[in-house]
Structures are given as structure tokens and as C-alpha cells.
Amino acid sequence: MITVNSAQEAVDTVANEAILAAIQQTFAVGGAIIHNATGEVIAALHNNVLMPFPGSNTPYFLPHDPTAHGERQLVDWYYENAASLGLPPPGQLTVVTTLDPCAMCAGSLLTAGFNVAVSAIDDYAGINYNSQFNFPSLPPQIRQQAQNSWGYYAIAAPVSRAYQGANSPVFSGQSIDSAAYYLTSSIFSASVNTVREASNNSGLDPSKLKNPADLPANSPVRQALAALSPYALTVQCENPRDPGAELAPPLLVTAQQSSVFNSVALIDPFGNLLVCLGGAENQSPIRTAFMETTRGYAVMRWTLMNDPDPAVRAQAEQYLTHPKYGTFVFLYAPDPTTPQAVMTFGAYGSTMEGPVPQSYPSNLQYVLLPGNTTAQALSQLAQNLPPFYTQSVQVAPAQVLSQDLINTVKNGV
Ligand SMILES: [Zn+2]
């Protein structure tokens, strides 16, 4: 068991994780859960968006899991282990991270209620991108929570940054040396563009793609899809960006079988329903339907693309492409007053990891809005996100066009 005694030691620990991430050629970010009272490092992790396949000679510049940022993984790790390890509640713990959390991770951390302490700023995708500590990307109801539980360590000369934040993070008010700050900042900057491009460019253009509906029942791609989602390839929409009432049964039945009544479908460029999953919020409050769907598809594709059999790898490449060419359809849009909504839009941004091909309507669609939410409130949340999400990805949630689908789902909920 490692124990740290200062902000410097805490940042040195997570910087080591960021170095391991850089060696893995993924986003060079690291984090740890530290017990405020004891300084014990309860868990330390790094980014795993890109991951080598054990024993494979093939290149691994393919997203293993676009949601596998260090902080998001730490939140799920906590819920997997809290009971068996007898861990204190998140409010007595701090997630220390080398880099300001992105929208997905910020939403995850705020949902769980961790304290957060940060070394380097990310002025493109970080939730404190403007360095003002006013969190304009968060729903107004959540900003105060962040201001009460987050902190940005002071940096000694020559950088000379004052501590910014609350008293509750571990080692709040303390400073780190400029070398540690430069390491955490520059190691991420050196990784970000290549990893983003590798993720965003990792699939065939739809004009070159083959239709998985044509595959025989025993093909590896069809079997992997069926194992992930019972509705895989059972529904075809005439227009992949304009799903009709045929999508209602999978969305509704999947939602009924899930811990929270919601589901998300991924439709491919041929209009095939590839994946339709609900959330696992009974295991971790951040395992929402969208998180499960995007992660499930990415990990399945990565596994096939790294299969020892070259024929399986070739089939995966020819039939399954990047989700930016597909359409995500939520049964219910996320509630824009919650940190889960920030997490969801952030995870969508991390799934796209760059520009989305121009299309109408958006490939981020929902059938219904929750509670008293308006479409305008949902769009406003998307428009308030850090620059990466508004300028590069251009997150634009839109209701499905088909009134038939809306009415059929309304009758079923
Ligand atoms: Zn993140």
C-alpha cells in the first residue's frame, strides 16, 4: 500500500501513470483515488482508450474503449470494489489527476461525488478550460458542487500559479513544483493529436463498407454482434438517420429489462440496428445506456480487429466502421440538469474524437425528452461544452424525425 504525504507526492504518483499511458501510445493522462484522511493511494490508473492486444503483431491504433479515461475508470473501479474493500464514501476521497477532467470525466466524478485535485489545465476539452473556476459547461445546479469539492494545485515558480479551489480535496492549498506541472502538461500535449486522429480515422468510409446483414449466421462479426446485443441485425431502418417505428420494440424491451428505464441503439450506415443496450446503474451510477452502448460496440470491434485469425480481422474491418458514420438513438435524452448529461455528451464527444461527417439530421438522436426538459435546454447544455465539443465534434442532440416512432414509443412507456 502506497501512502502519499503532499500534493507533490500525489502528482508525482499520477504523473507516473501518465508516463505509462504515453508508453502505451494512448492519451497520456493518469489519476488516482487518494484517501483524504490517510493519504493512502487506494487505486491508480491511466488512460486506456488505445490498448495493445496481447500477443498481436497488428497495429493497435484503434480505440479499445473511447470511455476509458483514467478518471471515468476510477469511478467505475470504486463502485466495483467499494463494498468488498470497505471503502469510505466518495466525499472522503479525492481523485487526483494529471489533467483537468474532460466533460465525460467531470460528469462521472460529479455524479459519484468525489473530491478532485488537478495538475495541468486542458484549454480545449477540460471542464475548467477557461481557468476561471466558474465551470460554464456544467448545468447551473452543478457548478456549486464543483466549486465546493474541486481544486487546482498551486505551482511554484517559475510557473507561479496560485491554488484555485475548495478546501475539501486532499492536500488542498498545497503547491507542486514546475517540473511536475510541465511533465503532466507536456506529456498530454505530445499525445493528444496523434491519439485523436487515430481514433477519429479508424474505420472505412461507408462507400467502401460491406453490409453485415449479408453475413451468414456463423460469421464471427454476426456472432460477436449477437453476443453483445440480442437485437443486433434484427431491425433494418430504411434511412439510417431517420429511424421509424421499427426501432420502438428494441428500445422499449431493452429499457424494461434495465435498471433505469432507458436504452440506446446504434444504427450503422446501412440502417442496420447493430447494438441496443440499457444501463447498469445498479452496479455504478455512471454506467448509463449510452456508456454501455458505445463501450460495448468499441470493445467488440477492437477485439475482432485484433483476432489472431487474419480472416476475422479482415471481416471486422470490412463490415464494422467508426460510429461517427452511424446514428445513436436514445429512448430518453439525458436530463440536462444532471452531471450524467455532461458525462453523456462528453462520452459522445470522446466516441467521435473529432469531426463528424456532415449529415442531416445529427447522428445524436433521442425519441423522448425526460420530465420537464425542453429541447432548448438540452441544446443549451451541448452549446456550453468546452471548445473541443462545440468546435471539433459539434455535439448537436436532435429529436428523431419520425412522428411514428415517437408515438409508438410514447404508447409503450
Ligand atoms: Zn476524460
Image (cartoon, helix red, strand yellow):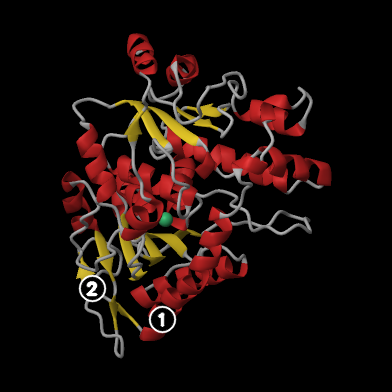
Q: Residues within 10 Å of mark 1 (few under 14, many from 20)?
A: some
**Which of the two residues, 279 or 401, is positioned nearer the viewer here?**
401
Going by the numbered disc 2, the residue's amino acid type is: Gly
Q: Quadrant of residue 164?
A: bottom left
Q: Which residue is mark 2?
A: 173
Instruction: Kindly give the residue lying farthest to the top in the view shown.
Output: 411
Q: Is residue 153 above or below residue 46?
A: below
Q: Quadrant of residue 255?
A: top left
Going by the numbered disc 1, the residue's amino acid type is: Tyr
Q: Give the image location of residue 197, x and y in percent.
A: 54, 61
Residue at left offset 41%, top offset 75%: 185
Labels in figure, total = 2
Mark number displayed over residue 210: none
Q: Give the image location of residue 110, x and y in percent.
A: 30, 48
Residue at left offset 30%, top offset 65%: 170
Closer to viewer: mark 1 or mark 2: 1
Is residue 89 at all visible to an observer of this figure? no
**Which of the two residues, 173 or 222, is positioned nearer the viewer here?**
222
Instruction: Kindly give the residue lying farthest to the bottom in the view shown.
Output: 158
Q: Quadrant of residue 23?
A: bottom right
**Which of the two residues, 258 or 212, is positioned nearer the viewer here?**
212
Horizontal side of 396 relative to 270 (left or right) equals left
Q: Quadrant of the C terminus?
A: top left
**Which of the two residues, 313 or 394, is positioned nearer the viewer here?**
394
Look at the numbered disc 1 and give the secondary structure of its residue: helix
Q: Which residue is mark 1?
A: 182
Horizontal side of 272 relative to 163 (left or right) equals right
Is residue 267 at all visible to an observer of this figure? yes
Circle nearer the N terminus (1, 2): 2
